[in-house]
Image (tube, rainbow, N blue to C red):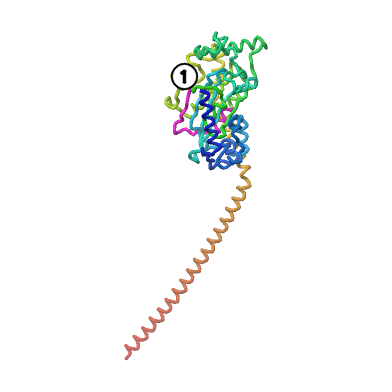
């Protein structure tokens, strides 16, 4: 099906170049946040210098969760209006059976404005594979998979046993060569789409992938991009090392998936899975009927990435992040707020002057009416006196 993907990709690239697919900009985000989460819009696509060749290579911008958080803090914008509308959890079908999440987010203030980001973990010693190779040699943590299965390229062994065997074999070989299990710094990434085109996921994750689970959040969910970035950053800091057996892409992604599902308060019907992966509705840190690792190591992993533990740490981290954003926003808005207060004070001064003028006019009008009333009464009294005099004269005759 590679030819189909190539044709589809070419079609979408032509769509972008010819501007057939609209890319509206969000309405309330700061320019910096628009640039971060919606890199190309109808307003800047002519200036973006995104050529056909660039789109063909990698139509994404790669960040870390921490770098995006720092950017949001510096801008004083937590992007509360960017809400998560869908979550998909994928596993690649070819070695190294990499797992990753795709988060779709939308601007609640501007209907129709949505994009997606890929969240994934690699190791600094195991980089993303060369997209030109069906079975990449780089980042191949299951390089000996053929030997484990007994047939080169065979994938007939049940997934749980196959992956566990491959990981154990890879770890065993590492121990033999270096005396310690393969471990490196984790390379955790937030990969944001340039053109909002889901067909481009194949470029970031070459080779076929299988969707293991999908979350359609309930309508009551208000989980935002900021919350997901905080969660991803927390998991990265919690286990900053990439370990084949304890903190690889499986556990990184599934820990984020589990906590996200809890944050969204999902019911059973909000999470869609195949029959073989129904456990992801409740506990993603499994692989079919068996854990990826067993025994003491399985218990250790379960404790490290336990959703309740991660959630507790997450709530503290989110509160600190939002406080930093608000403090920065207050500093950033201070000059504007000072001008605003001055303008408000001047407006109140004008209002008070107008009120006093109106009060003076009202008193003047009342005094004028009082004088007119006094004159009217005097005239009435004079007329009455004249009438009485006339009556007296008549009675004297």
Name the residue nearer the viewer: 265 or 215. 215
- Give coordinates of residue 358: x percent, y percent: 51, 63
Q: Residue sitting at 47 percent across and 74 percent down?
A: 371
Say if residue 240 shows up in the picture. no
75 on left or right of 375: right
Mark 1 residue crowding within 10 angstroms, few (<14) / some (14–19) / many (20+): some
Give the labeled residue for mark 1.
277
Q: Residue at x 59, y 11 (%)?
A: 169
Q: Residue furthest right?
A: 178
Residue 343 percent coordinates (x, y): 59, 53
Q: Is 354 positioned to the left or the right of 74 in the image?
A: left
Residue 170 appears in the rendering: yes
- Residue occupying the far top of the picture: 150
In this view, 159 is above or below 360: above
Which quadrant of the rendered structure holds the C terminus? bottom left
Give above or below for 91 relative to 385.
Answer: above
Question: Residue 139: x, y in percent?
Answer: 61, 19
Residue at figure coordinates x 49%, y 13% from the top left: 158
Count of labels in the image? 1
Name which quarter of the figure residue 45 lies in.
Answer: top right
- 34 and 46: which is toward the camera: 46
Considering every residue shown, the one lying at the far bottom of the view is: 397
From the viewer's side, name the closer residue of 229 and 385.
229
Q: Quadrant of residue 142?
A: top right
Q: Is residue 333 magenta?
A: no
Residue 15 x %, y %: 53, 36
Q: Using residue 274 as the reference point, say whether residue 191 is left or right of it.
A: right
Q: Is residue 216 magenta?
A: yes
Q: Identify the secondary structure beneath mark 1.
A: helix
The stretch in magenta equals 212-233
């Amino acid at each position: 099906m590679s030819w189909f993907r190539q044709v589809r990709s070419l079609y979408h690239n032509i769509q972008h170049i010819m501007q057939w697919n609209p890319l509206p900009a969000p309405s309330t985000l700061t320019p910096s946040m628009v640039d971060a989460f919606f890199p190309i819009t109808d307003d800047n696509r002519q200036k973006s210098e995104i050529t056909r060749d660039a789109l063909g290579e990698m139509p994404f911008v790669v960040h870390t969760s921490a770098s995006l958080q720092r950017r949001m803090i510096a801008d004083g914008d937590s992007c509360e209006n960017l809400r998560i509308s869908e979550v998909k959890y994928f596993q690649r079908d070819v070695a190294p059976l990499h797992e990753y999440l795709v988060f779709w987010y939308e601007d609640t203030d501007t209907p129709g404005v949505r994009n997606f980001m890929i969240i994934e973990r690699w190791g600094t010693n195991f980089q993303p594979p060369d997209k030109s190779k069906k079975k990449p040699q780089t980042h191949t943590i299951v390089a000996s998979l053929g030997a484990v299965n007994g047939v080169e390229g065979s994938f007939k062994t049940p997934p749980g046993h196959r992956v566990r065997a491959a990981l154990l074999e890879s770890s065993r070989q590492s121990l033999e060569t270096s005396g310690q299990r393969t471990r490196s710094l984790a390379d955790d990434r937030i990969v944001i789409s340039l053109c909002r085109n889901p067909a481009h996921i194949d470029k970031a994750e070459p080779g076929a992938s299988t969707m293991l689970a999908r979350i359609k959040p309930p309508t009551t969910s208000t989980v935002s991009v900021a919350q997901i970035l905080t969660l991803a950053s927390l998991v990265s800091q919690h286990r900053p090392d990439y370990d084949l057996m304890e903190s690889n892409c499986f556990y990184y992604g599934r820990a984020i998936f589990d906590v996200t599902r809890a944050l969204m308060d999902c019911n059973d019907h909000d999470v869609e899975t195949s029959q073989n992966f129904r456990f992801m509705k409740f506990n993603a840190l499994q692989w079919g009927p068996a854990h990826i690792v067993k025994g003491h190591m399985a218990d250790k992993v379960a404790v490290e990435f336990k959703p309740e533990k991660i959630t507790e740490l997450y709530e503290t981290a989110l509160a600190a992040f939002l406080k930093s954003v608000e403090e920065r926003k207050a500093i950033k808005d201070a000059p504007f707020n000072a001008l605003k207060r001055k303008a408000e004070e001047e407006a109140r001064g004008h209002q008070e002057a107008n009120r006093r003028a109106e009060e003076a006019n009202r008193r003047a009008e009342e005094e004028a009416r009082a004088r007119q009333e006094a004159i009217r009464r005097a005239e009435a009294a004079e007329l009455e006196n004249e009438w009485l005099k006339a009556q007296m004269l008549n009675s004297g005759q």
